[in-house]
Image (spheres, rainbow, N blue to C red):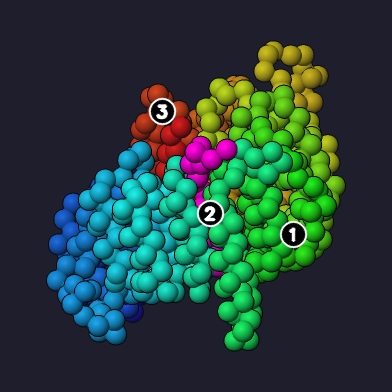
Amino acid sequence: MDNPTHRVLSVPELVVLIAGFLSPYDTSQWMQTCRTAYRQLESTFWSHLNLTASYTDPSALPLYRHHFRTIQVDWHQTGHLAALVEELPLIETRQTNEIELLNLKKLVLRSKAFVVKEAEMDAFIEILSYTRNLTVLDIPGDVLQHAGSATYFIEKIQEDLPNLQRLVFSIADVEAPVAHHLLKVCFHHPQLVDLQCDFMINMFLYPIVANGGVFDPRFAALLTFLQDEDKKKADIGKPTGLRLKSLVLPLINGGYPRDFLFPFLRSHVPHLERLDIPLIHRHYNVQDLKDAILEGCPKLQHIVSNNFLGYEGGQSALFDVVRYCVPLGLRSFRASFHELGFQDVRGRDLVKTLLEYHATTLEQFELFDHGGVTSVQMNSVLVKCRKLREFRIDTFERSIRNPRRAVITYQDAASSVWICHDIKVLYLRLDPIVTVPVADTIQDTVDQEGKETYAQIGRLVKLEELGLGCTVSGSAMKDLTLENGWLAELAELKELRHFCMLTNLWASMGQAEIEFMEANWPKLERISIGMEEDSSEVEEFSKPHWQWLKERRPYIVLTINKW
């Protein structure tokens, strides 16, 4: 018998959609009254909990706490975390092997506030006593700004999170003693393989030493600690060095002293595959850097540069690593060009260097605040990098009026054949160049180049996520129409799951375009459009053609991104 409920629950996308609207209590009631719902939803719904402002009553959480595997929570909802461990005996009153633990594997906290309150910290730290199975912890760096609670939190990492494998801190300013204590504990952790300390160490109390960077005796102490740990391991026949495969060191104004950084890379991170290139004090020997990484990090294939600032040492270190220190070839590269103007050539030089040395191995390429990277260079990545799987350039977080936006022109995109046929994620901002009335012959050329540009995209048939933006011109805003644009060129993107349109590319769409997407993109499950904060088009998705799509695909997610 064809059971409608079973058919509904057999669609994974619909299950995900429902999960976003039901509370744990509602979910449990549904599962208790519907056997099919229980079978389909048990693993899916209990595995993830998103605590946002919509959850105002946490009373049901203790009933289902042992089912949760992933929790994402806003800081202002940390009181709900405390509800998860209500009525559990205090840790201090029980033996370690008697503690009733949560089965939580991943905990993500998000904060938009500049100050984390002590009460919020207490609620967060309390739950860590019951999460010995936790493997991923992603939290704001703000947790390290209160000296007392930060020390307690770091002790929790050491004592109560033995299975932790990934630890991520977002941007903050952290005092040097706290930061060094954290690094020491993390370096000693038996399971940690991914450490991302994306925060600034406040070291203004220490003088700049000529040719050496910022002098802080804790760096020498940290090296001594690592050397002692390696000696203990060697004495009992264990492999020396840290288990870390991915590392983002905290940012230091002026750069790291070479007397710490080079021995650290040479001797203590033999398994490192991904590294955020830290700023190095400008007076260093290139050969010393090369020797340290080649000898100590032979598996390095992924580079991140979140700190590409105006420091001479930071720039040259990144270039030197790209040129000399990745003999296996780079597989991924991600950079943010902070504080570089549109005409700054350093971003362009970096892309040129990447293509010169790593075009045959590069699989992932992301640039933010692009620092003057040209249309020709961006197109060259698509033309030369056959193994490319993900390509993101300036993912539209800026205003459409910002002159620093990165674009690929129709002319450049149509000039050469893209060879990255296995790419799955592509984000581009396109530009027809012509923004004023022109002669018919020139407009015909622009139209032909635009058609070929979209044909290039349409031939990337393995795409699962596509983000397109355009410059502010009336013609470009019609790119994704059937009558005056080239939406039809994208008909073969049968694997597409997420379609992202910004800078008003969606504004000229109507019923025909939506029916085209529904007919040709069978796996489409999410559509995102972008608007500026002051835009009046807040009811875009209430228009008839979008409502028609919702009726045809109830599970599809339509989102508006504001910037």
Residues rendered magenta in the picture: 193-207
In the drawing, what numbered circle is on residue 218?
A: 2
Marks 1 and 3, the one that precedes in the sequence:
1
- For label 2, the crowd category at 10 Å Cα-Cα, with few meaning under 14, some 14 to 19 and many 20 or more, is few
**Amino acid type shown at disc 3:** Glu
Residue count near mark 1 (Cα–Cα under 10 Å), binned few <14, some 14–19, many ≥20: many
- Does residue 15 appear anywhere in the picture? no
Q: Which residue is mark 1?
A: 293
Amino acid type, residue under disc 2 in the picture: Arg
In the depicted structure, whether residue 486 falls above or below residue 391: above
The tag earlier along the polypeptide, 2 or 1, is: 2
Q: Confirm or deny contact between disc 2 and disc 3 (CB under 8 A).
A: no
- Circle 3 residue: 533
Is residue 499 rendered to the left or right of residue 103?
Answer: right
Left or right placement of residue 281 versus residue 1 in this view: right
530 displayed left or right of 435: left
Q: Is residue 200 magenta?
A: yes
Q: Earlier in the sequence, mark 2 or mark 3?
A: 2
- Where residue 532 sits: x, y (%)? 45, 28
Task: Tell me the kind of residue under disc 1.
Answer: Ile
The image shows residue 373, relative to residue 123, as above or below, that is: above
